[in-house]
Amino acid sequence: MTLNALLFDVDGTLADTERDGHRPAFNQAFADAGLDWHWDAALYGKLLAVTGGKERMKHYIDQYRPDYVKTADFDEMVVNLHKAKTRHYSALAANGGIPMRPGVKRLLTEARAAGLRLAIATTTTPENVTVLLEHSLGPGTQDWFEVIAAGDIVPAKKPAPDIYFYAMEKMGVSAAECLAFEDSENGIRASLGAGLKTLVTVNDYTLDHDFSGTAVVLSDLGEPDAPCRRLAGADLGRPFVDVAYLRALHAA
């Protein structure tokens, strides 16, 4: 089967959004609400085991703050906190505070030129995706993606494969003609669960994750003057990921 489509996770895959984007945005939302909640980098790394911001806040209270007494409107408060966090994240991204990871813009540009179809499959909100693409990748770049499957568009978030099934259904493609790009164990459980061959680029939070079953694990996508490092999986003998690399990986 020919490679026709690329499906991308966002947080940690396209950009290092978690530590330097979402985490400070959560903390600002907490401070604005007068809460004494604060997520440092180490704690946030543990909280990332739970996908979805609202779900993450509830997990934090249940597991790390037994002293906190939930009010009757706790669920509504979590929703409002998440909306505030999204506003702070958007402001940060709009100021150019969250750059794309190495090789991302180059590869997307090359893939489009080669006629490959692009989509996004993520648990983050559509607003977060749009502001990141527009301000970190460039104006109009959200239109590069045929489908942006994001947030609560499916009830079951990663590690459930539903978001990938949704994206492929909307595109009218099969898993056999796609490659997925992920950065975390929850992400690959979703992509592999959808039958997708998957390329992983790790980040500081996911270095020790179990990536069994993936096609290749890399430090990043690399650039011609800054090669990526292969950590596991297929050795294609190329210093950075380009369309030729993707076609070879898909065929391997």
Image (tube, helix red, strand yellow):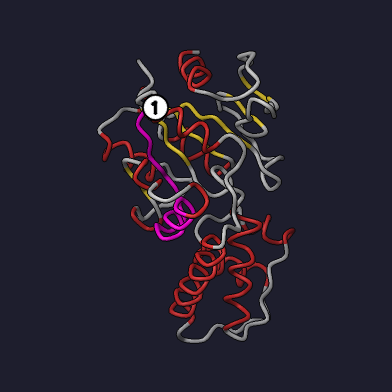
Disc 1 element = helix
Query: Which residue is tagged 1?
Result: 113
Rendered position, 88 above or below 117? below
Residue 102, given in percent of the width and then of the height, sits at 62, 37
Q: Quadrant of residue 14?
A: top right
Residue 220 visible here: yes
Q: Quadrant of residue 29?
A: bottom right
Task: Tell me which residue sits at (38%, 35%) in the image.
Answer: 118
Rendered position, 239 above or below 17? above
Rendered position, 82 above or below 106? below
Task: Tell me which residue sits at (41%, 43%) in the image.
Answer: 120
Residue 55, given in percent of the width and then of the height, sits at 51, 63
The segment highlighted magenta reads: 116-134
Nearer to the camera, 244 or 4: 244
Compared across the picture, whether 225 is left or right of 251 comes to right
Nearer to the camera, 185 or 29: 29
Examine the structure image and report whether residue 118 is included in the region drawn in magenta: yes
Please identify the quadrant where the N terminus is shown. Answer: top left
Task: Tell me which residue sits at (52%, 86%) in the image.
Answer: 71
Q: Quadrant of residue 109?
A: top left
Residue 82, given in percent of the width and then of the height, sits at 49, 70
Nearer to the camera, 139 or 12: 139
Residue 216, given in percent of the width and then of the height, sits at 59, 25
Rendered position, 58 above or below 18? below
Q: Tag 1: residue type?
A: Ala
Nearer to the camera, 185 or 148: 148
Compared across the picture, whether 227 is left or right of 90 comes to right
